[in-house]
Amino acid sequence: MIYKQYGNTGLNVSAVGFGGMRFDTTKSNEENAELVLYAYDKGINFFDTAPGYCADKSEDIFGIAFRQLSAERKKFFVSTKGTPSEFDTSQKSQDAVDKSLERLGIDYIDFYYVWCIRTVGQYELAMVDGGQYEGLLAAKSQGKIRHITISSHLRGDQLGDILAKDEFDGVLLGINILNFGYRWSAVELARKKGLGVVAMNPLSGGVIPQNEKKLSYLAAADETPTQAALRFCISSPEIAVTLNGFTTKEHIDMACMVADSAIEFSPERLDAIRKSIPEGASGICTSCGYCLKDCPKKIPISGYLQIYNESLIADRSESEMAKLIKDNHSWGLLADKWADAKDCIRCHRCEENCTQHINIMDRLEVMDRWEEKAYELEAKELSQKSDT
């Protein structure tokens, strides 16, 4: 494992971090805690969680492991989070910190994130008098938090304006080999100001490992696109920690192997990759699911957008996309849908919640056109079956 400085904190953190959002919830908390201990033995010392992750089991799973590592407490680092909307007063914010401390079985949290800032208004809510940030400052003064940080999905320029105010010690943001042009300005500013940068979604929410053949241009001769994507974040000097959501020991082994042999991408290689990414690929949906929260029609938006990703990654025809949708009607992402793409009423709620600022409604219009063709294919197949 390689280790890096987390901004100006003086802390040495593992280049690979354990993101606590991918535990196998069919297993017991104790079994999942063994995975955390395995990662620690492999050299990972940065562990990230949040209330609500994994059916609200994540903090408890880490707590089981951390209690077993209590004698090693100074050797590993813990981050958790809270949203400004849920913890909108100083007292609620402090209560949330206390609850996380109890569940995690630790006396202090190394990094506490003002979580999931998707709009400037959400940041402003956190910063009002008597709001979340004020509560976090109080918790920090009591030794319950070491560093106040921010987790954001804003564009690079918007986030840069916030980071310039010197209110946070670090930043967590979605950055990967496909979208680095979208947020890299914020990454560079954060590093220049001495903030620690933590990358989430290094595999673009699973898009990269699921489409390795199409994304072969990302990789060098001796690696897979998945390994190349991990190497991009792990080897970037601007990024202190690359979070990986681990489900198995094999996932941990692969990430650690990449870290042990990571060679930094040259500027020439990055420029070649940037030019190779298909038009619009920086808008690939990573399926965070926030778009689903307020849809009045209950359209399975993230399912549609995952299918739309195929048109961004590969040059697929309309008939190919229609067949893909048809297949997903039967057994895939759209098998249990409540509504069709055509049911969108353009209320803008999904786009307001989108962490990547995707033009969702326009994409749904395109998906509607493809879906009509999919229904025609289904009707044709049904007719052929009835004839026989």
Image: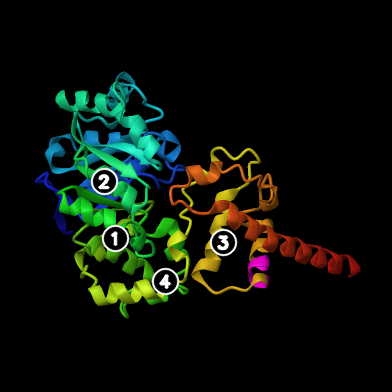
The numbered mark, 1 or 2, whose residue comes first in the sequence reads: 2
Image: 148 above or below 245: above
Indicate yes or no whether the magenta region holds residue 320.
yes
Reading the image, the residue beneath label 1 is: 255
Identify the amino acid type marked 2: Val
Reading the image, the residue beneath label 3 is: 308
Reading the image, the residue beneath label 4 is: 277
Which of discs 1 and 2 lies nearer the camera? The answer is 2
Image: 368 above or below 36: below
- The chief SS type of the magenta part is helix
The numbered mark, 2 or 3, whose residue comes first in the sequence reads: 2
Identify the amino acid type marked 3: Tyr
3D distance between C-alphas at marks 1 and 3: 28 Å
What residue span does the magenta drawing correspond to?
Answer: 319-323
Using the rendered image of the protein, determine whether residue 29 is visible from the camera's viewpoint. no
Which of discs 1 and 3 lies nearer the camera? The answer is 3
Residue 304 lies left or right of residue 288; in this view the side is right
3D distance between C-alphas at marks 1 and 2: 22 Å
Residue at the (13%, 43%) spot, across then down: 75
Reading the image, the residue beneath label 2 is: 171
Q: Are marks 4 and 2 in contact (CB under 8 Å)?
A: no
The numbered mark, 1 or 4, whose residue comes first in the sequence reads: 1
Q: Are marks 1 and 3 in contact (CB under 8 Å)?
A: no
Q: Which mark is residue 78?
A: none
- Callout 1: SS: helix
